[in-house]
Image (cartoon, rainbow, N blue to C red):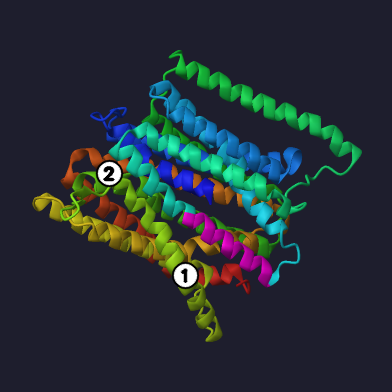
Amino acid sequence: MWERCSYYGMRALLVLFMVDSIKGGLGFSDRTATAIYGLYTALVYLAALPGGWIADRLLGAQRSVWFGGMIIAAGHFTLAIPATQTFFLGLLFVVLGTGLLKPNISVIVGELYPEGGARRDAGFSIFYMGINLGAFIGPLVCSFLGEKINWHYGFAAAGVGMLLGLLQFKLTAKHLGDAGLRTRRKTDAAERRLDKGWYFVAAGMGTVVLLVGLGLTGVVKFNPVPLAQNATYVIVGLGVIYFAGMFLFGKLDGGEKKRSVALIILLLASAMFWSGFEQAGSSLNLFAERYTHRVIAALRFEIPAGWFQSLNPVFIITFAPVFAALWVALARRNLNPSLPAKFALGLVLLGMGFLVMAVASRLVVSGGQVLPFWLITTYLIHTFGELCLSPVGLSAVTKLAPRRFVGQMMGLWFLATSLGNLIAGLIAGQLAGGAEQVAWMFLRVVLTTAGAGVLLLLLVRPMRKLIGDIR
């Protein structure tokens, strides 16, 4: 819960702080700020890959969560120091800490219910509700302090939230038993490999420290926009190389090849979805700040722009049980949509949400600001899209990936999510042209995301043949 609280608190503040030039922000351009935001969120997902490896081989999930939480808290408090250098250093700490914490919390929850079945499903449901409760609270607290008082108070509040989470984790750790304590090292040979594993970690951290040092001292200049653009090429290239190697040298049988092709299509759809959905912390956040009427006259109070980030968690908590019941009811009637159909529906709903924003932007062009109704409607439709696609995403990977490549395919799911976050930041940078430019940008997102959804709907029947009898 508390990790999500701090993450969503950061999501509500980051771009607004970076573009602000009046109240102590960094005064970056929209393109620079959103590119940095895209790099930050993309690295959060990429860091989950080495974070999971460290937990599996070296620390165990519980210790990884503990150390990750401490690093995240250190990052937030570093962000609270008013200096450009500490801002980037704080972001780095948050990325590294989240990489240790994010993938391993779920591992602990899973190990609490080794028998699986309904109890494990119920446990994950409680966990899912908890993290969304934290995601609801974070923006409310951090945005109020950041926007109304001082940006750095908002960052510090996220750090306090993380410390509260660590305290709760330590006080209740006795209830976890052995869940998340074990690593995979069981033999003498594995024990010897442990030292080598720490060498890899040390080498990786040394590289990070070197690059950060060169950047903070100005020896090497990092331009966020080209860096984000080049990072997208690198991620796409890694995906292409991996799948090419798997098809050429993985010794896949005919069925595995067909299912892998279907999985590639779904990974591309996932990246497309997150490239639109993750506009929430960038373009939609800026739209709330600049073009949305947020004053409650009766209370003489202006709603902080970041408070709109709490809408998605509220809608998730409200409608996740509804969608779960809907899929069950449809399954009883043999009408439950297939995996590709749910992905397609998620993309179409995402496009519909941006269509609402395109209309709102045209109203802004006509004059004045628009009511919060437009953003609330968009977040609601986007949440419906998320509930169609996100819950079945990891399930699709486990079902379609060849058995001996499941773990690596999980990594590729995070890679696709990371790619989507990078693209989201680059798209959001087009806000700088004013309301007219914003309207066209949202319309292009409608055409690409909804268009991809319609294309995927047309591919449902041939993809069913690729997937076979897997449901």
The amino acid type found where label 1 is placed reads Ala
Q: Secondary structure at mark 1?
A: helix
Using the image as rendered, state which of residue 56 and residue 414 is in the foreground.
Answer: 56
How far across and down, in percent of the image, does residue 171 sit?
66, 47
How far across and down, in percent of the image, does residue 417 sit?
50, 49
> Is residue 130 magenta-colored?
yes
Q: Are marks 2 and 1 in contact (CB under 8 Å)?
A: no
> Is residue 218 magenta-colored?
no
Label 2 crowd (10 A; few <14 / some 14-19 / many >=20): many
**Quarter-wise, where is residue 57 in the image?**
top right
The amino acid type found where label 2 is placed reads Leu
> Can the viewer see residue 235 in this picture?
no
Q: Secondary structure at mark 2?
A: helix
- Please tell me how many numbered marks the rendered image carries: 2
Bounds of the magenta segment? 118-133
Q: Residue 55 — which label?
A: none
Query: In the visual, does 82 lie left or right of 148?
Result: right
The residue lying at 46 percent from left, 74 percent from top is 322
Mark 1 — residue?
341
Residue farthest toward the left in the current orientation of the protein = 367
Mark 2 — residue?
286
Quarter holding the C terminus is: bottom right
